[in-house]
Amino acid sequence: MSDKGTVSPKEKEATEKRGRGRPRKQPQVKTSDEPSGSPTPKRPRGRPKGSKNKTTGKGKVGNYKRAVKRFDDGHRLCNDLMGCLQERAKIEKSYGDQLTAWSKRWRQLIEKGPQYGSVERAWLAVMTEAEKVSELHQEVKNNLVNDDVEKVKNWQKEAYHKQMIGGFKEAKEAEEGFKKAQKPWAKKLKEMEAAKKGYHMACKEEKLAAAREANGKTEASVTPDQQKKLHEKVDKCKQDTQKAKEKYEKSLEELNKCTPQYMESMEQVFDQCQQHEVKRLTFLKEALLDIKRHLNLTENPSYATIYRELERTILAANTQEDLKWFSNNHGPGMHMNWPAFEKKKPDGAPPTPSTDHVAPPGDRSSVSSYDKNQAYSTEWSDDEQPTTYSGNENGGNGNSFEDDSSTGKGVRVRALYDYEGQEQDELTFKAGDELTKTEDEDEQGWCRGRLDNGREGLYPANYVEPI
């Protein structure tokens, strides 16, 4: 201490360090004489402020933004649902077209093939089933596009009103309501924070003044007048601390008084947001039930009729009748033109018509008309390239509920040491791993970051270095 009773900068710095407590230790760097292996510095003590429920505290100003964002999410979900239904409609149409093409191809092959009689009719009934089912899937496609998609689009238009400057009217009204309800309480909170800061500064000054007075008593170079001034300084600091404390307590009491009214006003605005969300969820449930009704062909009477007719046709196939028909037309029972005595015909007379059996219309002879030297391909290939569908077509926005923070920017850092997280919200990494720092170091020595695999969490700031 100087002769004038003032404190030198070095003494002041040493006193302030003693007032703050011991500084946080840094990890020791491994030297060439140390054994191999990564050094393991101690994990910082304490938890960072708001490490778990950082944005869910009831007393945080502006903590209503997630409720306001739900209006934007609701509008986007309507677009996603419409895109989903449009993709399904394309699938239904594609399936129906494939059934029709398959039925046409195989109907021709069967009709030209050697199969005959009632079994041939049963086989062709399978092709008829495919054609009718194809029509039902085309109907499903039309219901999805013309009924379900239009229903969602109309409800979205009625529930969300876009503004000229961007955003939605409902979201703006909710945000203004929250701000209005929070404004008086936020003002009191700001006053309380200022009073708290002033009180803590006064306590710090009082402690510093007391340290100076104690040092002055032990030094012989300090005159009585200087000691008196130091004592007066301590008394003044005590008075300032008491005043700051009273102001801090008063502001905190005023804040607590207006808290119930603040909570009531905020809950009223939140209930209005909930009512809008109830309408959206109720509509979505009803829309999904309609979609289920359109997709579920088993509830369609025509669908059951198709398979009843198919079963009836298959059961009507009669083996004995088919064998009898074949015997009468191409076996021993067929009409034979046995040789008989014929008189000589006069010159120029037309030839005698053949007496071979002629099948009646509609009862063709499959065998007689079948060209056995003609090759028919019955191969079936499933190697067709599937159609790719995108959720961004026709109003679909794809799946965009990823956490907005996953695309945020940050600072790339490299781990100096291995660290294994000891809590669920802490990261685990190895020395040399790279990650992204998304929040700066806090008072406790923790940073928030994101690994390359997308996991976010906390890690000790002294375990990494900037890249």
Image: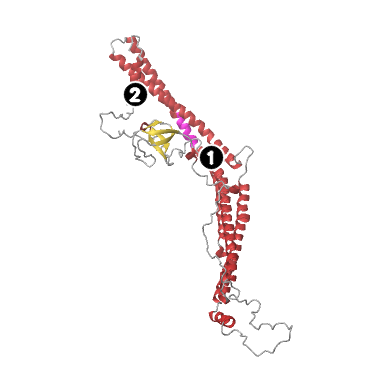
**What residue type is disc 1 on?**
Ser
Q: Position of residue 377 (x, y in %)?
A: 55, 65
Considering the numbered disc 2 on the image, is that residue within a helix, a strand or a loop? helix
Of residue 225 and residue 397, the one placed in the foreground of this image is: 397
- Badge 1 is on which residue? 265
Residue 130 shows in this picture:
no
Residue at image position (41%, 33%) is 413
- Badge 2 is on which residue? 19
254 in the magenta segment: yes
Q: Nearer the viewer, mark 1 or mark 2?
A: 2
Q: Quadrant of residue 307?
A: bottom right
Considering the numbered disc 1 on the image, is that residue within a helix, a strand or a loop? helix
Local crowd size for mark 2, using a 10 Å CA cut-off: few (<14), some (14–19), many (≥20):
few
Of residue 130 and residue 302, the one placed in the foreground of this image is: 130
- Mark-to-mark CA distance, 1 and 2: 43 Å
The span shown in magenta is: 250-259
Residue at image position (29%, 14%) is 217
Numbered disc total: 2
Residue 398 shows in this picture:
yes
Of residue 393 and residue 127, the one placed in the foreground of this image is: 127
Q: Is residue 461 above or below residue 13?
A: below
